Amino acid sequence: MIAEEEFGVAVVVAHMACEISAERALSRAYEAKDTGFLGESATMMLPSYNLANDRVRNLYNAVTRKEIQQQSFWPAFRESATRRNQAVHEGRILTKAEAEASLKAATDLVAFLR
């Protein structure tokens, strides 16, 4: 999508991959703690699987005992999440450099969640 100059779409798709990875990471964490039965109930209370959201991140940190916001990629991911929101909700036009930065941030987050 970046090569096709669809920069906004590239950022949105990158964040979709992050949310799918977050959902899978939470499911694995529930199962590992033998609390799989909580998964559906707990996640139904979440607005999404966007780890930039405080409620989602707090649940992830509690279940995994990891402080994801302490990871080196976190500031870039938060910046990318803001960029994504601006593109989707405010119609902001994104640049190639921004799309590439979001792709890197998303790739780093997904790698960490695996």
Image (tube, helix red, strand yellow):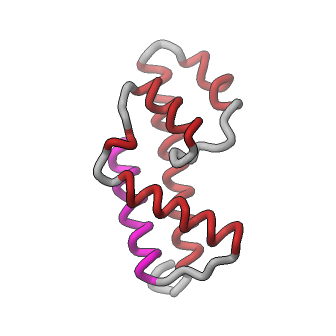
Work out whether residue 67 or residue 102 is closer to the camera in this orientation and state it. Answer: 67
Number of marks: 0
Res. 87 image quadrant: bottom right
Along the horizontal axis of the image, is 38 left or right of 72?
Answer: right
Q: Is residue 57 above or below residue 20?
A: above
x and y percentages locating residue 42 in the rendered image: 64, 25
Q: Is residue 12 above or below residue 113?
A: below
Is 35 magenta? The answer is: no
- Name which residue lies at 56% across and 56% down: 16
Along the horizontal axis of the image, is 102 left or right of 41?
Answer: left
x and y percentages locating residue 9 in the rendered image: 59, 73
Q: Is residue 86 visible?
A: yes
Outermost residue on the left side: it is 72
Outermost residue on the top side: it is 34
Magenta residues, dominant SS class: helix
x and y percentages locating residue 24 in the rendered image: 50, 38
Q: Is residue 20 visible?
A: no
Quadrant location of the C terminus in the rendered image: top left
- Name which residue lies at 44% across and 67% down: 102
Magenta-tinted stretch: 96-114
- Name which residue lies at 47% across and 20% down: 31
x and y percentages locating residue 27 in the rendered image: 51, 30
Work out whether residue 8 or residue 62 is closer to the camera in this orientation and state it. Answer: 62
Q: Is residue 83 above or below residue 15?
A: below
Res. 29 image quadrant: top left
